[in-house]
Image: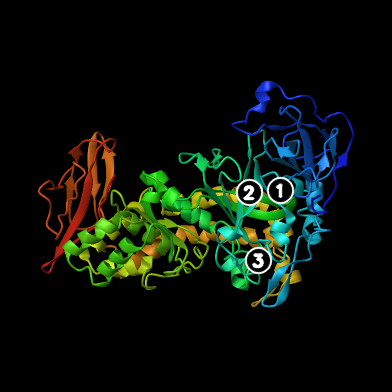
Amino acid sequence: MTSGLWLQVVAVLGGLCLAGPLPAQESKVRAKPAKIKFSEKRGLRDRPFTLTISTDAVGAQIYVTTNGTVPRPEVSSLVSGPLRIETTTMVRAAGYREGRLVTEVDTHTYLFPGDVMKQTGAGAPLTWGTNQNELVRADYAMDREIVEHPAYRGEFPEALRTLPSLSLVMDPADLYDPTRGIYSNPRQSGDAWERAGSVELMPGEGRRGFQENCGIRIQGGWNRRPEESPKHAFRLAFRKKYGAGKLEYPLFEGAGAKEFDTLVLRAGCNNTWLHWNATERKQGDYLRDQWMRESYAAMGHPSARGLFVHLYLNGLYWGIYNVTERPDERFAAGHGGGAPKDYDARNGENVISGDDAAWNRLFALVNHGVTEGAKLAAVGELLDLRAFIDFMILNFYGANADWDRASNWYAARRREPAGPFRFFVWDGERTLEGMEANTLSFDDDLSPPRLFHRLCEAEEFRIQFGDQVQRHLFGQGALTPEQAAARFRYWSQRLDPAIVAESARWGDYRRDVHRYKVGPFELYTRDDHWRPEIRRLLQDYFPGRTAVVLRQFQRAGLYPMVAAPTFREQSGHLVLSAPAGIIYVTEDGSDPRLTGGAPSVQARAYHEPMAGSLAGNRWRARALVQEDGHSQWSALAEP
């Protein structure tokens, strides 16, 4: 039985038990298990109700549990009538005939906001295993200072409705048992530490959700450590041994996959209210990684999509989580074609598909120097240079302070036919911190920064880098102040009411439960901590960061000092302008500059407005400045 108080279901006896002889057609093995039918939809409720459970499996008897375990005749309650649901309850139901399971195992979670506000975890385990030979103190309660605070008390029920609800239900022993529970052993990983469970999405507002049985395991690296974070991330694996084998549901907005083998429930670690460093706790916003992934997509590349939910774990509110795709070999195949087995894929230093032969060839090549054009072309066969440049520009814009050879990025390449590696943004929580932060100098072998530094030895790479800077930091580019802020504002507005629930669940942890490393240890709230950080980012960081990082690129020789031309249309003519130099323009989409620095034969020097329009054309232009026998081109400009 469950809820914040592990509350009970009251059974009202009736006549639901099914009986009768099997018709001839029922004696055959079913292709699919029979359905369990619930009279009431899962989701948030304000009033008690009566629940009827039935099945079309003739002769089956329905058994239910409310504690997370799978119903079995020998240990579960036989349904003999409607059930009265008065409190937060997770109902699991299954039909048996002559002791054999003949239906699916279905789960419906019913959530009462009033119960969530009063959640204490009474009856739940007092500890979550051990860490460094010490018991790990469990924490379930909602902080009374938040839920009863005049500024938040009236908002709380609605705060739980402003994001979709996601419910994970599983055997409590698989969560908390000292020897086999995943939450009591969070540093254990791999298939041996995956447990069966159910996931339900309840989007609210009359929208259709889903329920699917799946495997559940702890996800991530550093925040597996109990001292670092008590709020662990999860990975959901949809396999046939648990249920349908795939989640078929349009989980994310817009184009992209509509079925999933894997989902990650990101809990947040850096720049959250649970971090060991008080500076990062004060900067807690929970949005940085989502912003980074969406920014890479805005730059024109495949990127793991995400959304935010309120997570419930066996009926207990667990906080705000970021549900995302995992950019593994399946993700790469979904965007690049072929089958997952056709791909080499990496999660940092860990090979998760294929092998590292091509990876080692790539680094052997760049570590021997890439000053010659032929070597840069050879690198281009193993690495998608444009996508890599954009990947690096984004991480430099955010001044990523937490990546190396080991972690916090994914990469994949198709082996047959052979293709180049492409990087995917992951775990960008240590970004968007200081306005003047500069991480261009960081280097580590076998990491994206090492590729960057070796490639910068080649002039043509620096030219390409500057062209991509022009594309993304000017005009309507993805990293202009307006566009960068708009993506952040979209999610901050959606999290603003919901963050009150996160504050009640975890905002007091470092003050009241575990004072770890650097103080001060405060009660973290929306109005005193979260909103000021959101304002700082929207009012200061995004308006100023583009210009700051542009200067950093110029000082590093990655963006020319010569300004690129601008385009405008006037009276049916195309007008170009540049502060200095001769403007060279092409009409066929080709580069006015040839490799090596000479003007292209397709380029013409611009002297006066040209007949034409911006729409539907392929104009390209650069400015060329020649002084003291030296020539310098601007970055490539497009309308």
* Residue 289 showing in the rendered view: yes
**Mark in the foreground, 3 or 2:** 3
Q: Is residue 483 above or below residue 184?
A: above
Q: Residues within 10 Å of mark 1 (few under 14, many from 20)?
A: many
Which label sits on residue 309?
2
Secondary element at tag 3:
loop
Gap in angstroms between the C-alphas marked 3 and 1: 31 Å
Q: Residues within 10 Å of mark 2 (few under 14, many from 20)?
A: many
Quadrant of res 270: bottom right
Callout 3 amino acid:
Asn
Residue that sits furthest to the top in the current view: 24
Callout 2 amino acid:
Val
* Residue 495 in the image, given as x and y percentages of width and height: 62, 51
- Viewer-nearest residue: 418 or 627: 418
Which label sits on residue 429?
none
- Viewer-nearest residue: 408 or 253: 408
* Residue 558 showing in the rendered view: no
Callout 1 amino acid:
Ala
* Marks 3,1: beta carbons within 8 A: no
Secondary element at tag 1:
helix
Chain-order first, disc 1 or disc 2: 1
* Residue 445 in the image, given as x and y percentages of width and height: 36, 72
Chain-order first, disc 3 or disc 1: 1
* Residue 259 in the image, given as x and y percentages of width and height: 51, 40
Q: Which residue is mark 1?
A: 159
Gap in angstroms between the C-alphas marked 3 and 2: 25 Å
Q: Is residue 242 above or below residue 360?
A: above
Residue that sits furthest to the right in the current view: 13
Which label sits on residue 185?
3
Quadrant of res 206: top right
Does residue 17 appear to the left or right of 27 in the view shown? Answer: right
Gap in angstroms between the C-alphas marked 1 and 2: 11 Å
